[in-house]
């Protein structure tokens, strides 16, 4: 089920410019395929300076998005490393003699550790 979407006059004008450009290309290559800035200028009917600013802004946005993704990935990595270190501490504590106070601290640490364990199949 498609819905009708209303576009502003500016967006309609941009679409019209793109359609005209594609029709020109269909008849023969008007602008070299490798001259991206000139093709964009013709496609959007804007000046070369505007194309340069638009591409610069786009590169800046892409860079910021990649930086955010990298930071999120680093945070996930750090969280994973912390869980691994906690696991190793637990294993070392198990091998040493356990007192009642260390047992409660181990139980607390295990409760805070978010390592998934497989469930046993209880359907049998």
Image (tube, rainbow, N blue to C red):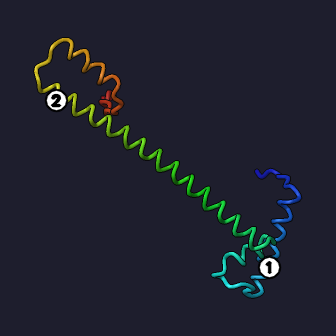
All told, the count of numbered labels is 2
* Nearer to the camera, 67 or 81: 67
Is 47 above or below relative to 115?
below
Q: Position of residue 67 (x, y in %)?
A: 51, 51
Which residue, as the protein is rendered here, is positioned at the far top? 100
| Residue where numbered disc 1 is placed | 23
Where residue 36 appears, as percent x and y from the top left, is: 66, 76
For marks 1 and 2, give the CA distance.
71 Å
10 Å crowding of disc 1: few (<14), some (14-19), many (20+): few
- Residue 50, how many percent across, how many down? 75, 67
State whether residue 66 is above or below residue 72: below
Question: In which quarter of the view is residue 104 placed?
Answer: top left
Residue, disc 2: 92
Is 76 left, or right, of 8 in this rendering? left
Compare residues 50 and 18 and report the one nearer the observer: 50
Query: Which element type, helix, strand or loop, lies under badge 2?
Result: helix
Q: Is residue 120 left or right of residue 45?
A: left
Label 1 element class = helix
Query: Which circle's residue, 1 or 2, is located before the other in the chain?
Result: 1
Residue 34 placement (x, y as % from top left)? 63, 81
On the picture, is 102 further left or further right than 31?
left
For image coordinates 56% across by 57% down, the residue present is 63
């Amino acid at each position: 089920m498609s819905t009708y979407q209303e576009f502003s006059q500016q967006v309609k004008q941009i679409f019209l410019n793109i359609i005209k450009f594609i029709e020109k290309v269909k008849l023969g290559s008007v602008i070299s395929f490798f001259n991206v800035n000139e093709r964009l200028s013709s496609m959007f009917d804007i000046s070369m300076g505007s194309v340069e600013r638009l591409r610069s802004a786009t590169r800046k946005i892409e860079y910021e998005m990649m930086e955010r993704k990298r930071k999120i990935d680093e945070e996930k990595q750090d969280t994973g490393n912390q869980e691994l270190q906690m696991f190793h501490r637990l294993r070392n504590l198990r091998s040493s003699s356990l007192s009642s106070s260390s047992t409660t601290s181990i139980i607390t640490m295990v409760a805070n550790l978010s390592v998934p364990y497989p469930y046993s199949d209880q359907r049998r």
